[in-house]
Image (cartoon, helix red, strand yellow):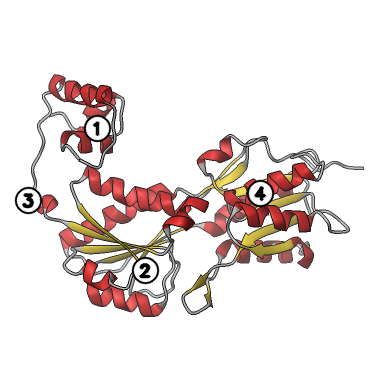
């Protein structure tokens, strides 16, 4: 029996697009030619839509920590959300999406079958969400509390792989440019990228305070902090940027200073955003599969509610180094 994946493969589109086209989703913007290919593929394969009462009546709440404006500046949380929403589309799951800052978010989430919380939340909000619903999954929130279910990235091994790579290329003067984030009320958020860099450099007696700069996780911040870094009496030979958005700003600052990447300074980013492959030079970065995190989160939540499994889970997704053109060996005088 043909599946949505079979139709998608024959039509040359994604399974999510097939589901939305065959279900006549009014929110989908697709070319007439694309819709025609999908319907023709479904007919050719004798595909029949399956109807499931449990799926059709399932509603998933999505709570966002990042605002829409923040998503535009750094696509990491945007990709997590898209992963959740595409899963819901493919499985005919209704979605109720709210922001943590909404005054009426409790009313909006009343009656949903489960909640996916994307981002960083205070213990007060965590308890609030769990009081609202017994089925809650937190994405990208590394909490040690074993009473909650979380899916996080393995930032520690991701950062270490980047620093190991730079060290193998002969770099000892490695700088860090990152950002600071806070939960409501000003509570600072623990950043495993920052702490891993600190431990790594201190273990090797290579840490220099002037090589560690932090502000915000955006391109403007990366640009301004890099200009400050390049004014140091002894410049670093490599920079680890805690996000690709920061790295894009670093590239601009380095070029304006009349320097070249990687000839004069090597650069590693973090996230593996789509644009990282098209910078000049293309950016070596850590792939943090945010979209996959969203898919896994939605799938885990859906499974929890179906099987009534009350055991909390801690899931950690591997991050991997993607080597491109922005790193080179240290020049020896």
Q: Is the residue 26 above or below the residue 116 in the image?
A: above
Q: Which residue is mark 3?
A: 53
Q: Which residue is mark 1?
A: 5
In percent of the image, x 11 and y 24: which residue is there?
46
In percent of the image, x 19 and y 64: which residue is there?
112
Q: Which is more foreground, mark 3 or mark 2?
A: 2
Name the residue nearer the viewer: 88 or 69: 69
Report how far apart the C-alphas of labels 3 and 2 lie in the structure: 30 Å
Report how far apart the C-alphas of labels 1 and 2 lie in the structure: 35 Å
Residue 134 visible here: no
In percent of the image, x 72 and y 65: which residue is there?
203
**Which numbered dot is residue 249?**
4
Of the numbered discs 4 and 3, the one sitting upstream in the chain is 3
Of the numbered discs 3 and 2, the one sitting upstream in the chain is 3
In percent of the image, x 29 and y 54: which residue is there?
298
Of the numbered discs 1 and 2, the one sitting upstream in the chain is 1
């Amino acid at each position: 029996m043909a599946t949505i994946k079979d139709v998608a493969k024959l039509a040359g589109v994604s399974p999510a697009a097939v589901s939305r086209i065959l279900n006549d989703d009014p929110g989908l913007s697709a070319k007439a030619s694309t819709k025609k290919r999908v319907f023709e593929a479904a007919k050719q394969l004798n595909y029949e839509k399956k109807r499931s009462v449990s799926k059709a009546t399932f509603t998933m709440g999505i709570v966002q920590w990042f605002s829409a404006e923040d998503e535009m500046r750094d696509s990491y949380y945007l990709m997590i959300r898209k992963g959740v929403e595409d899963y819901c589309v493919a499985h005919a799951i209704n979605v109720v999406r709210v922001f943590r800052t909404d005054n009426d978010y409790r009313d909006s989430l009343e009656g949903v079958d489960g909640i996916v919380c994307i981002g960083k939340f205070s213990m007060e909000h965590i308890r609030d969400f769990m009081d609202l619903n017994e089925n809650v999954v937190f994405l990208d929130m590394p909490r040690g509390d074993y009473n909650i279910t979380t899916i996080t990235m393995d930032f520690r091994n991701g950062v270490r792989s980047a620093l190991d790579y730079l060290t193998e290329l002969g770099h000892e003067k490695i700088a860090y440019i990152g950002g600071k984030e806070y939960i409501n009320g000003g509570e600072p958020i623990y950043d495993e990228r920052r702490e891993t860099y600190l431990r790594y450099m201190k273990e090797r007696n290579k840490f220099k305070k002037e090589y560690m700069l932090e502000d915000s996780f955006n391109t403007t911040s990366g640009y301004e902090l890099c200009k400050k870094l390049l004014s140091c009496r002894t410049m670093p030979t490599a920079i680890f940027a805690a996000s690709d958005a920061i790295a894009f700003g670093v590239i601009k600052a380095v070029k304006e200073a009349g320097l070249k990447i990687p000839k004069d300074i090597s650069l590693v980013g973090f996230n593996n955003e789509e644009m990282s492959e098209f910078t000049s030079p293309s950016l070596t970065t850590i792939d943090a599969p945010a979209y996959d995190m969203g898919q896994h989160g939605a799938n885990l939540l859906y499974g929890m509610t179906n099987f009534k499994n009350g055991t909390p889970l801690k899931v950690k997704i591997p991050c991997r180094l993607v080597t491109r053109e922005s790193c080179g060996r240290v020049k020896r005088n």
